[in-house]
Image (cartoon, rainbow, N blue to C red):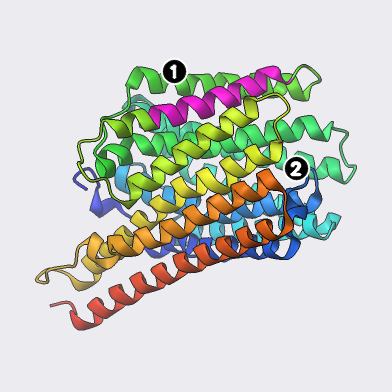
Amino acid sequence: MARLALERAPDAAAPGRFLRSVPAWGALAGLMLLVQGDALLASRWSPATVAWVHVFTLGVLGNAMFGSLLQFLPAAAGVAVRGGPRGARVLHAALNLGAAALVAGLWWPQAGLRAAGALGLGLAFALLGAATLPGLLAGLRGGLLPKGLALAVASGVGTAALGGLLVAAMDGVVPLPIARWTDWHAALGLVGWALGLLAAVGRVVMPMFQGTPEPSARGQGAWLAGLALGLPAAGLAWAAGGHGDALRLVVVAALLTFALAGLWLQARSRKAAPGPLAGAWRLGFVAIACGGVVLAWPGAPAVLAGVLVVAVALPMLVLSMLLEIDAFLGWITLHRRCGRGWQLPGVQTLLPAPRRRGVLRLFALAGLGLVLAAAWRHGPVARLAGALLLAAHLGLAWAQLGLSRAVRGFAVAHPPR
């Protein structure tokens, strides 16, 4: 933790409200699959499936990524986030209310709900860009970290803009070839926003928490340049009526190089006994690589590739890091509340490794169930996967509740001197 600037870390309530919203959205995803079964895995174009996907991308991953950014930027990247606590509350409301309206408008096809969702989400990503991009752009000469984070946030803003256009096209407001623009929207969101953010953050957290070497600056710079140039060019070409092979190539190359580089770095870790975080990231890297192979394979089901990346890999990578951040937020709270003179419990004590490992094993089981359900398309298997997904997020909520109790208990027993 030597590279973390504790004095710059925000009040824990700002990122914490995003992180505590994740289990509710994940439980909703589990319930939807438990009720609908393999109907949610029949086609990527089903409105119910699109709603389910956005529960993951906006509710689960969106909350985790927004909250992580609010913590990571000032504490680890030295970037000031504008807006303060009030801005964080508005951002949280816009993201979650917008996501809820969009998901409801897709699940029960309602144009008004979809439009409200698109407006709320557009506002959320615009606010995120306004809060973070000025500081990131001012520090672009500071190395790859601000460049990667700026690219990720800009991709998120672009994804929200494309999503708004797609909602308008669904309602007949603008004439767009929805299938082509959806591919561009998905590629920009999953690769530019989610994978780009993980690659940037991984440059710090993999050496810090997993003992890996630092990624090659030249290699990561080339990877970022490929995303910055390839995603807009290939996406626009496909959306405008060209061939989709270039966009598929960019996405597959990004997935495979990210996953293989991560596995290569982990194989060179200085730690003899990797912890739960390293194991979760290893599983995430493998799932991303499998998703890239399936996406590249002619005739392979697109739903299986989507499940591997959206429902298995990205949650393993993001939510395992969420546990680390949540524990660190608890420690920061005690550091500021109790003051000097007390020996504070360590981060690993507030959220012990066995509890983290138990939660991540639940997510691994749920991921296996989801992959089997997508590959097999059998109703009982899909419902079992939904039950496992629900259990995993309830386990995450229970771990977060235990962490909160530990923090409150220590604070009450050790008042400021």
Q: Position of residue 138 (x, y in %)?
A: 40, 32
Q: Determine the image quadrant of residue 253.
A: top right
For label 2, the SS is: loop
Give the residue drawn at x 47%, y 53%: 364
Q: Which mark, by number, is residue 122?
A: none
In reply to whether residue 249 is colored magenta, the answer given is yes
Amino acid carrying mark 2 in the image: Arg
Name the foreground residue: 224 vs 154. Answer: 224
Residue 43 horizontal/vertical position (percent): 78, 44
Pick the residue in front: 79 or 328: 328
Quick check: 347 left or right of 373? left
Residue at 76%, 32% (x, y): give it: 181
Q: Position of residue 322 (x, y in %)?
A: 41, 54
Q: Residues within 10 Å of mark 2 (few under 14, many from 20)?
A: some
Q: What residue is at 78 percent from the left and 17 percent from the top?
A: 242
Asked whether the viewer can see residue 352, the reply is yes
Of mark 1 and mark 2, the one earlier in the sequence is 2
Magenta stretch: helix, strand or loop mostly? helix
Question: Is residue 404 magenta-colored?
Answer: no
Kind of residue at badge 1: Ala
| Marks 1,2: beta carbons within 8 A | no
Query: Label 1 neighbourhood size at 10 Å, few (<14), some (14-19), many (20+)?
Result: few
Quadrant placement of the C terminus:
bottom left
Asked if residue 77 can be seen in this view, the reply is: no
Give the residues in magenta: 244-262
Question: Disc 2 designates what residue?
Answer: 44
Camera-nearest residue between 156 and 141: 156
Residue annotated with mark 1: 222
Q: CA distance from mark 1 to mark 2?
A: 32 Å
Q: Is residue 31 left or right of residue 22?
A: right
**Residue 363 point in image, percent of width and height:** 48, 56
